[in-house]
Image (cartoon, rainbow, N blue to C red):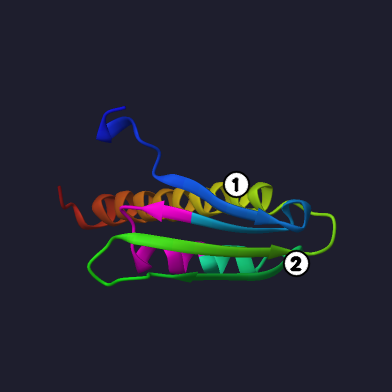
Amino acid sequence: MSPQSKSRLEVIETTNGGECAIVSLTDEDHTLANALRYVMVRNSDVKFFGYSMPHPNDNVVLLQIQMNAGLNAINALEKGFRDLMDSCQHVKHVFNKSYQHFQHNSGAD
């Protein structure tokens, strides 16, 4: 397997029937991890979400997820990534719309 084809997301451990999980995310840092944390803790089904970077020289983030009883941590993480992507798309759309409005009203190119 070439380095490019290696998955950047790896499930390290799941416990309690999938309610808890530790996931490793490579080639990322606090930027993505903190944004994901913000999205995850807004989900009322998430009991705990935290992240750590074991060493400052390594771009590896460990995500820790704990769900309410009977819910799957990996499913919640997937939803968190989708929600974060939706938020980013919304920001991009609003920015582009505002920029076009600015260009139209100022005559700038």
Q: Which mark is residue 44?
A: 2
Q: Which mark is residue 95?
A: none
Q: Nearer the viewer, residue 66 or 46?
A: 66
- Pointer 1 with pointer 2, Cβ within 8 A: no
Q: Is residue 17 magenta?
A: no
Secondary structure type for disc 1: helix
Q: Is residue 33 magenta?
A: yes
Could you tell which of marks 1 and 2 lies nearer the N-terminus?
2
Q: Please provide percent x and percent y for residue 87.
A: 51, 55
Q: Please provide percent x and percent y for residue 57.
A: 22, 68
In 3D space, how far apart are the residues under numbered discs 1 and 2 (Cα atoms)? 15 Å
The reply, left or right, for residue 79 in relation to residue 102 is right
Q: Nearer the viewer, residue 90 or 104?
A: 90
Q: Please provide percent x and percent y for residue 88.
A: 45, 53
Q: Quadrant of the N terminus?
A: top left
Q: Looking at the image, which residue is at 26% across and 35% down?
A: 3
Q: Which residue is mark 1?
A: 78
Q: Amino acid at mark 2?
A: Ser
Q: Please provide percent x and percent y for residue 37.
A: 53, 67
> Which residues are drawn in magenta?
24-36
The reply, left or right, for residue 33 in relation to residue 16 is left
User: Which image quadrant for residue 105?
Assistant: bottom left
Q: Looking at the image, which residue is at 35% across and 35% down?
A: 6
Q: Looking at the image, which residue is at 16% across and 52% down?
A: 108
Q: Amino acid at mark 1?
A: Glu
Query: Badge 1 local density, few (<14 within 10 Å), some, or many (20+)?
Result: few
Work out which residue is located at the far top of the displayed protein and give it.
Answer: 1
Q: Nearer the viewer, residue 7 or 96?
A: 7
Query: Badge 2 local density, few (<14 within 10 Å), some, or many (20+)?
Result: few
The reply, left or right, for residue 101 in relation to residue 65 is left
Q: Is residue 10 above or below residue 16?
A: above
Secondary structure type for disc 2: loop
